[in-house]
Amino acid sequence: MGGGELDLVCRDQETLVFVEVKARQKDAWERPATAVDQRKRRLIIRAADAYLAELMNPEINVRFDIVEVRLDEDDVFNVNWIPSAFDGKGN
């Protein structure tokens, strides 16, 4: 979709939320969100733009969130939700 993929598309009242989910083992050095670099953000934004175009560009607020999942082997150890992790320009 637009050269990228969308993990989750949700609605929070009057806001359409595009959510990137990143998982890492709990002992990893970096937080999972660090994997959502500028390049990945651009791909997510491009996919979100394509998704909105399919909906005929409705007048709706848009937000980009990240959900970090920490794993202990195959079990979920911790989940951290980062609302408004970046804006529609990738910042």
Image (cartoon, grey):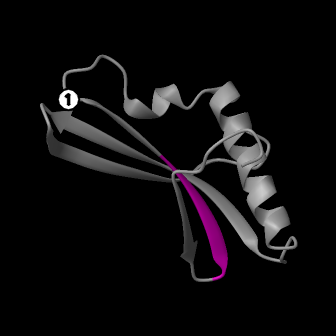
Q: Nearer the viewer, residue 30 or 72?
A: 72
Q: Quadrant of residue 51?
A: bottom right
Q: Nearer the viewer, residue 29 or 7?
A: 7
Instruction: Report the magenta stretch's main SS.
Output: strand
**Residue 61 point in image, percent of width and height:** 74, 71
Q: Quadrant of residue 39?
A: top right
Q: Quadrant of residue 76?
A: top left
Tally the numbered discs. 1
- Vertical order, 34 against 46 (above or below): above
Task: Please state, as top left, top right, bottom left or bottom right, where the C terminus lies in the image.
Answer: top right
Q: Which residue is labeled 1 in the image? A: 26
**Residue 90 point in image, percent of width and height:** 73, 39
Left or right of 17? Residue 46 is: right
Left or right of 33? Residue 89 is: right
Magenta span has 24?
no
**Residue 17 point in image, percent of width and height:** 60, 64
- Residue numbers of the magenta segment: 14-20
Which residue corresponds to the image point at 28% horizontal and 49% vertical from the top-left? Answer: 79
Which residue corresponds to the image point at 72% horizontal and 54% vertical from the top-left? Answer: 48
What secondary structure is found at the residue carrying circle 1? loop
Which residue corresponds to the image point at 68% horizontal and 40% vertical from the top-left? Answer: 4
Left or right of 27? Residue 64 is: right
Magenta span has 16?
yes
